[in-house]
């Protein structure tokens, strides 16, 4: 009996999305049930930004069998415990959205409610909510250690991500994928041939024709297949997220490497700071409706901590997502599928989610099913929508009215899903948890309080408790966080240890 023919997968694009997809498909199917080809163009290049991640990236690497020390060395990575937001609710404010919990639930009641009860009714000595989060205490003191496995220990209440050079990461995954049989073809796609089921083949400028059964569009903002050929629609979110451009520039490192990313609000947008081992990545995301690019560039350069290492580069984007990311035999992954500004470092995670979903639904028998495409589209649309709401929360919950941009952001209409969610928290401190969606209640909590949204009422079950009880619990958690952070090495020392491991 002859073996079933292998599925021919063609990935168009070799940025972070293309090589993450290629590495995963190689690990999952290559050589056995599928042959994977990736076509990319050095002449066109990649977007070359995308350095901060969320903790799920660790599970992506683990699934590929990538060893952390090797990855950290080869991508110049640093560790990340969260994101510091400066000047968002009011100028002078600073809060951290940590990758971890605030205290722990007590008898099924959220810890933050105890904190609220103690803070409202106690004296001034009640520790801040930040003091009850180990990753925040560690981040504020530039310390880092991986979490413990013991679920009873405060040292197990957080997670971590990486800040890395995305170009080096793509190169790393390219080595991984090619070693597992992925064939890379250098060339510029000039034409796309279609048939009733979607894409039949792509043609390169040198006339090479590449046929396939499944095509993955990782061609970045160009979206050559999903938009160019298949005309997928686009849902535009620029009325909620009006930033549409960014200047990016690397700078020299100054001082210790912080185990967190920073996002500082500016007059018509915000500025990122991402410390890597060899340099700091900086960028200014802004809205051309509210400021001009020259002014945005000046602001970026005036606010670098170290010397600029290159000329700033400007990128334009459009916020939103494709209405369908899987059409026929074509699946869009990465910037071709949609874009949300990097305020919460979510793009690489959305790539990871799409790849996971693709592998789960992959037509290993070569038979494409419209139900699979519908499920993929449903799940990915929901993930993008949830991230959108979380990003909008940072902007709308502000007291700033110092510029037209901030006046617009604080008064604009919100997505109804977000209005409902904010109302639940403002009224009784309820953080509605979703069955799907990447941000867990602790993340929403960090941003609600950080943006100065405070519940009007404490949960009645806690409001009836003696204040001294809530106060003692808060003090104990804060003391445990402080002690655990003090026992960690500095982030620099941990990095040095990993690099020589
Ligand atoms: P690209 O990197 O653009 O790759 C596209 C590929 O397609 C390239 O290989 C190109 O050569 C190829 N290609 C295009 N046209 C053709 C053609 N005709 N023929 C052949 N090949 C072609 N994400 C995060 O997770 N964290 C961050 O901190 C972050 N910061 C960001 C900051 C900014 C300002 C922007 C714009 C994005 C940021 N992102 C971030 C998003 C992140 O950069 C992308 O999600 C990620 O790099 C994946 O990009 P991509 O692979 O889809 O596209």
Image (cartoon, grey):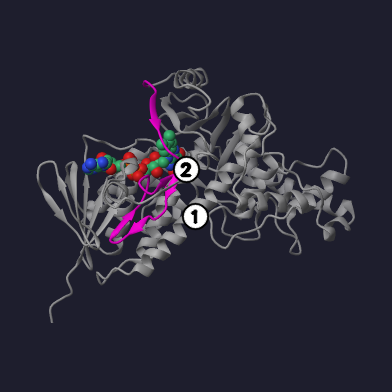
Residue positioned 25% across, 72% down in the render: 365
Residue interval drawn in magenta: 310-339
Q: Is residue 82 magenta?
A: no
**Residue 466 vs residue 409: left or right?**
right
As displayed, is residue 22 above or below residue 342?
below
Is 459 in front, or is 318?
A: 318
Disc on res. 340: 2
* Horizontal and vertical percent position of residue 22: 28, 54
The 10 Å Cα crowd at callout 1, few under 14, some 14 to 19, many 20 or more, is some
Mark 1 within 8 Å of ligand 1, using the beta carbon: no
Q: Quadrant of ligand 1?
A: top left
Q: Is residue 321 magenta?
A: yes
| Element under disc 2 | loop
Is 153 in front, or is 77?
A: 77
Residue bearing the label numbered 1: 383
| Element under disc 1 | helix
């Amino acid at each position: 009996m002859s073996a079933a023919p292998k599925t021919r997968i063609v990935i168009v694009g070799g940025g972070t999305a293309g090589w993450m997809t290629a590495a995963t498909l190689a690990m999952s199917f290559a050589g056995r049930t599928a042959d994977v080809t990736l076509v990319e163009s050095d002449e066109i290049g990649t977007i070359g930004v995308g350095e901060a991640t969320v903790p799920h990236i660790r599970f992506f690497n683990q699934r590929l069998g990538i060893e952390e020390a090797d990855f950290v060395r080869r991508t110049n990575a640093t560790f990340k415990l969260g994101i510091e937001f400066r000047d968002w609710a009011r100028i002078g404010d600073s809060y951290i959205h940590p990758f971890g919990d605030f205290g722990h639930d007590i008898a099924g009641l959220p810890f933050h409610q105890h904190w609220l009860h103690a803070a409202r009714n106690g004296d001034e000595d009640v520790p801040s909510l930040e003091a009850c989060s180990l990753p925040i205490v560690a981040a504020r003191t530039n310390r880092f250690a991986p979490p413990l496995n013991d679920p009873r220990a405060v040292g197990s209440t957080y997670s971590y991500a990486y800040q890395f050079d995305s170009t080096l990461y793509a190169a790393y995954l390219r080595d991984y994928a090619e070693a597992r049989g992925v064939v890379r073809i250098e060339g510029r796609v000039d034409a796309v041939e279609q048939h009733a089921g979607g894409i039949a083949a792509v043609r390169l400028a040198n006339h090479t024709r590449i046929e396939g059964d499944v095509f993955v569009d990782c061609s970045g903002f160009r979206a050559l297949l999903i938009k160019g050929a298949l005309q997928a629609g686009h849902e535009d979110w620029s009325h909620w997220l009006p930033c549409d451009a960014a200047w990016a520039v690397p700078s020299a490192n100054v001082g210790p490497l912080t185990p967190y990313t920073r996002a500082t609000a500016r007059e018509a947008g915000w500025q990122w700071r991402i410390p890597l081992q060899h340099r700091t990545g900086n960028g200014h995301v802004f809205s051309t409706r509210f400021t001009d690019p020259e002014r945005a560039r000046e602001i970026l350069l005036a606010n670098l901590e170290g010397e600029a290492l290159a000329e700033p580069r400007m990128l334009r984007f459009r916020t939103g997502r494709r209405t369908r990311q899987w059409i026929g035999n074509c699946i869009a992954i990465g910037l071709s599928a949609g874009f949300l500004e990097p305020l919460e470092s979510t793009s690489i995670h959305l790539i990871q989610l799409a790849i996971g979903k693709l592998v789960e639904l992959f037509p290993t028998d070569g038979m494409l099913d419209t139900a699979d495409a519908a499920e993929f589209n449903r799940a990915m649309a929901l993930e993008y929508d949830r991230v959108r709401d979380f990003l909008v929360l940072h902007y709308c919950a502000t007291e700033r009215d110092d510029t037209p941009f901030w006046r617009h952001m604080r008064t604009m209409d919100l997505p109804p899903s977000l209005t409902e969610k904010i109302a639940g928290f403002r009224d009784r401190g309820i953080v509605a948890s979703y069955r799907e969606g990447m941000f867990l209640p602790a993340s929403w909590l960090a941003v609600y309080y950080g943006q100065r949204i405070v519940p009007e009422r404490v949960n009645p079950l806690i409001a009836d408790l003696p204040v001294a009880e809530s106060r003692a619990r808060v003090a104990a958690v804060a003391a445990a966080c402080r002690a655990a952070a003090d026992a960690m090495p500095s982030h620099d020392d941990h990095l040095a240890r990993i690099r020589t491991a």
